[in-house]
Amino acid sequence: VFCNYFFFLLRWKGPILKKGYRRRLELSDIYQIPSADSADNLSEKLEREWDRELATSKKKPKLINALRRCFFWKFMFYGLILYLGEVTKSVQPLLLGRIIASYDPDNSDERSIAYYLGIGLCLLFLVRTLLIHPAIFGLHHIGMQMRIAMFSLIYKKILKLSSRVLDKISTGQLVSLLSNNLNKFDEGLALAHFVWIAPLQVALLMGLLWDMLEASAFSGLAFLIVLAFFQAWLGQMMMKYRNKRAGKINERLVITSEIIENIQSVKAYCWEDAMEKMIESIRETELKLTRKAAYVRYFNSSAFFFSGFFVVFLAVLPYAVIKGIILRKIFTTISFCIVLRMTVTRQFPGSVQTWYDSIGAINKIQDFLLKKEYKALEYNLTTTGVELDKVTAFWDEGIGELFVKANQENNNSKAPSTDNNLFFSNFPLHASPVLQDINFRIEKGQLLAVSGSTGAGKTSLLMLIMGELEPSQGKIKHSGRISFSPQVSWIMPGTIKENIIFGVSYDEYRYKSVIKACQLEEDIAKFPDKDYTVLGEGGIILSGGQRARISLARAVYKDADLYLLDSPFGHLDIFTEKEIFKSCVCKLMANKTRILVTSKLEHLKIADKILILHEGSCYFYGTFSELQGQRPDFSSQLMGFDSFDQFSAERRNSILTETLRRFSFEGEGIGSRNEIKKQSFKQTSDFNDKRKNSIIINPLNASRKFSVVQKNGVQVNGIEDGHNDPPERRLSLVPDLEQGDVGLLRNNMLNTEHMLQGRRRQSVLNLMTGTSVNYGPNFAKKGSTTFRKMSMVPQANLSSEIDIYTRRLSRDSVLDITDEINEEDLKECFTDDAESMGTVTTWNTYFRYITIHKNLIFILILCVTVFLVEVRKSALDVMLTQMMTALKANATQSENSTSDKPPVIVTDTSAYYIIYIYVGVADTLLAMGIFRGLPLVHTLITVSKTLHQKMVHAVLHAPMSTFNSWKAGGMLNRFSKDTAVLDDLLPLTVFDFIQVCRIKV
């Protein structure tokens, strides 16, 4: 009956187990997650409490307070259930002792209620199962929810950080924050309640042991306390080794990541063997620390496993010597000591370690969440122009505040200095401003061409306008809707169309106009799947010019008031560059405000305004005719070169740098510097490295740090007059909903009565798949403006002068575009390399894993050692049984000397010999038990070393064609997560498997 009952309860998992046996499980085989566990709901809940903590905290905000308000009551509920389950576990030995006592013929009272005691013991087992397992599951569930919520909170925080802060955060730090620290909540939250359950349980158990063994019970407790301190010492030693090992792992992963990302250079210079030796050298040091940590861990585990014998021995021996002992008390004491040992040596230290690790992880996450975000600039919503007024900026964090303080002290002094050069020369080299005293103003629809010498601050100027670089002095005014094309083009894993649209609502007319203006029609037509061609990671199937044009098309497709184009014509030939500049920059975006970083005279002649920078300062600002009039030597020098625009970009920049140095005049403060003062305005030696590592200046690094960079929030086209701050800054680098999702109006004017605050944010998946969130039928009716719905029929005349940005999709038509979501492409681009693995794990996989290490002597030693330990353990149990039987027979025969059976003589001397033999066998068992895990640890870590060597060799010597299909993230997972499983988790799992098999045998 019970078998059928349990089969009925557990039959629900049969189908999923059958699928997992026949093939590898996929996401479609798993049930859909409940809404309460979705990242959107959990992140929104925690973010609301964190914002409340930021607003109400008088001192430093505490993330643990926000977590407490979100999860405390559910956490305590499961803690109380867990406590009741542990109480039932403590009471079970008491009933077991009374059941054993019922077999005593002289104890008639216990015999009469033996059946009831047996039923009660079974009910306690059932109640314990019904209480402990749901409680542990609930605590794991809460840990998972906390991890998801904090992961989302960190992810959103990353999108708000300025590039100056992100430059100081390495990929290893982010990976450690998002994986190692957050995983502690999944792994250890079930033990957190034992920090208060364990003392109560120890008090209850000691009270029950005192009733049976009196004061001798404290001997076993004293041994457990000493053992707990010994385990704590081992834990500190293990943490020391693991911390050193973590540094080596980070070092190895950084080098591995660099090799994978620059595999072309490694193969071009034949560095495969050198790189392999470098990685293996670091790996060897890492494995030495791994072995030491594993040895200590197994010493700790073995000490716990064999401590039960000595706890019982020390607790029973004093009482047996003084008063004697009966069988009932021995078995009851053993049961109590097993529970006590688990509480003192495992649960309580584990709970303390859990709280220590969790609070440390929370503090690290809290420090990250308190990092400085980008500062919102002053917006001018009445125009789409840009104005900079006496702006000075520093890349070094904190130097801007120092500059403001020094400037105030200079102004407050009795004799303030008016010489800016003298003022800045007082700053050290690393504190030099990247931009100094920049002034310009461009109106709506104008084109500003920015040029200058190498390292003059052209890209920093664009970062300043976007708010990534905070001005230390001066003011910046612009509308706030910005689209940015970076200097280094980058490609997101996805189709060509997804790379251009990038989360914005699809407008077929605008899309075709953009790809034609960016000279992409002919290139797209050559691909077999046209614009649905899936691009590999980093756009490896594209040429440099194709990547540059797709990156430019992404920025142009985005509707914005201000377009920042940072040298977008890299890797393009002269003819293509001219056509794109004419059709895209001058024609398609004619009504938009544009800032173009360029070094071509043709662009300077056409531009409405020209800004020439030299060493962080404004060398010239005005029109091209004014440049010829005010800087005749400079302009004539450049125009004197034959075919200056046909030179390479590097040569043009070199000529510009040399010319600016030669004709940099003196006497105006802005551009005048002698050679000594020039040094104070140069960037630091690591400035270029910072720029290369910036995910804004070099967005390719974004793919290294993050898989997808998204922006949440619903956009509006403008706001009501009188409001000076829009909801948030918008960049094309970070995709958002198209303004047409809300409804856009003619002439870029919108009159709304609300700021549309408090809207729920979209998830990253919704943004990537192009779907939108329905905000209700009245959402688009809050403004008093009419809306126009765009026809989806493609237009024939794409070269029309019609402004493509005046055409909009209504918010309802976005959901009608169902062909934009290609699940196969999405799976191919964003899933791991699971398809490269086998469908199921066969026995051949296990055999190859075991035999990959040629020296199998360690495996044989392991098997023999485990067998001998099990034999010794059985012999010890037999010895204890014989001793108790002999003592009982001796006592019986002394009372009934008329028995016909021959007497069993057990003298006091022989009893002592039996105790000595018991102690000797127990000591031998302890020694063998401690060392039985060492051969296994050594063997499996050596296997892990061999597998890592083969993996490194395979990657470095693979042909370049294979890297077109392999994903860098998948390969790094093999070297990080999977290697960690081989080093840490698999030895413990194999050890437990062998142990269970031996017990069954």
Image (cartoon, rainbow, N blue to C red):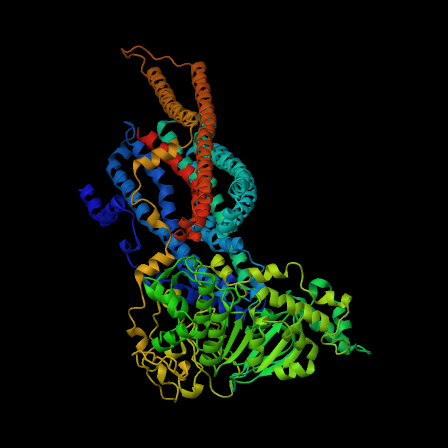
Residue 221, above or below 857: below
Quadrant of the drawing holding the C terminus: top left
Q: Quadrant of residue 603?
A: bottom right
User: Whole-percent x and y of residue 128?
Assistant: 33, 46
Instruction: Tell how many labels.
Output: 0
User: Whole-percent x and y of residue 946?
Assistant: 45, 36
Say left or right for 25 vs 522.
left
Residue furthest out toward the front? 642
Q: Is residue 64 visible?
A: no
Which of the pair 71/287 is nearer the observer? Answer: 287
Residue 666, above or below 957: below
Which of the pair 762/236 is nearer the observer? Answer: 762
Quadrant of the drawing holding the N terminus: top left
Which of the pair 104/2 is nearer the observer? Answer: 2
Which of the pair 846/875 is nearer the observer? Answer: 846
User: Whole-percent x and y of residue 385?
Assistant: 54, 83
